[in-house]
Amino acid sequence: MTTDRTFLVDEVSWAEAGPVLRAIRFEVFVNEQAVPEALEWDGLDPQCRHVLARDASGVPIGTGRLLPDGHIGRMAVLESWRRTGVGNAILAKLIGLAQARGDRVLILNAQSYVTAFYRRAGFEVTSAEFMEAGIPHVEMRRVLHTP
């Protein structure tokens, strides 16, 4: 039996898609990674640009956000869809949104165990390891080149 791994990533508004985005992040960060729920909801979501990955049937499978200051964050992919290209597609969409907006530098706090994922997308580690929500992280940056 083959499983359809087709998916799409689109920009969505927090006002319309907030409950779906929250559900994905709750599953990944709060349930799986034991991030305290109070830390997950920082109040910044209404100001951010969000992307949502959906499978071929339209079921939500991943998300990420771009803050007004060029930070990428809250990238989350449901466990059954990891290592299928969804994370790469979410990150590429967020980078594209930042480039179109004219951002010069992107910054993110990566969980230390996934730095290779971000390095493949052109990000470089720019800090020593630190703890965030009880999980080791590093800051990473990528300079964007304007066309």
Image (cartoon, rainbow, N blue to C red):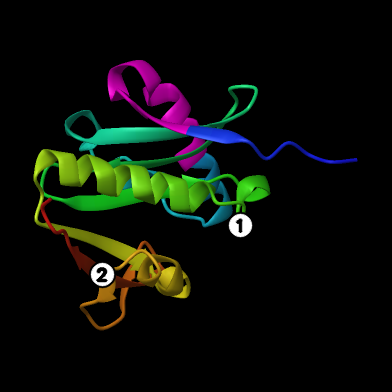
Q: Amino acid at mark 2?
A: Met
Label 2 SS: strand
Q: Position of residue 26 (x, y in %)?
A: 48, 40
Q: Kindly tell me whether residue 29 is visible in this rendering.
A: no
Query: What is the spatial separation of the Cα atoms under label 1 and label 2, in whole angstroms?
Result: 21 Å
User: Which residue is pictured at 36% across the width and 61% down the height?
Assistant: 133
Q: Is residue 89 above or below residue 125?
A: above
At x 73% / y 36%, what residue is drawn? 4
Q: What is the secondary structure assignment of the residue under circle 1?
A: loop
Q: Residue at x 30, y 68 (%)?
A: 122
Q: Count neighbours of disc 1 (C-alpha within 10 A) and say few if under 14, some if 14 to 19, many if 20 or more.
A: few
Q: Nearer the viewer, residue 28 or 104?
A: 104
Residue shown at 31%/80% (left/top)? Answer: 129
| Type of amino acid at the residue the image marks with label 1 | Arg
Quickly name the residue at label 1: 83
Which contiguous range is marked in magenta?
Answer: 9-25
Q: Tell whether position 80 is magenta.
A: no
Q: Nearer the viewer, residue 18 or 54?
A: 54
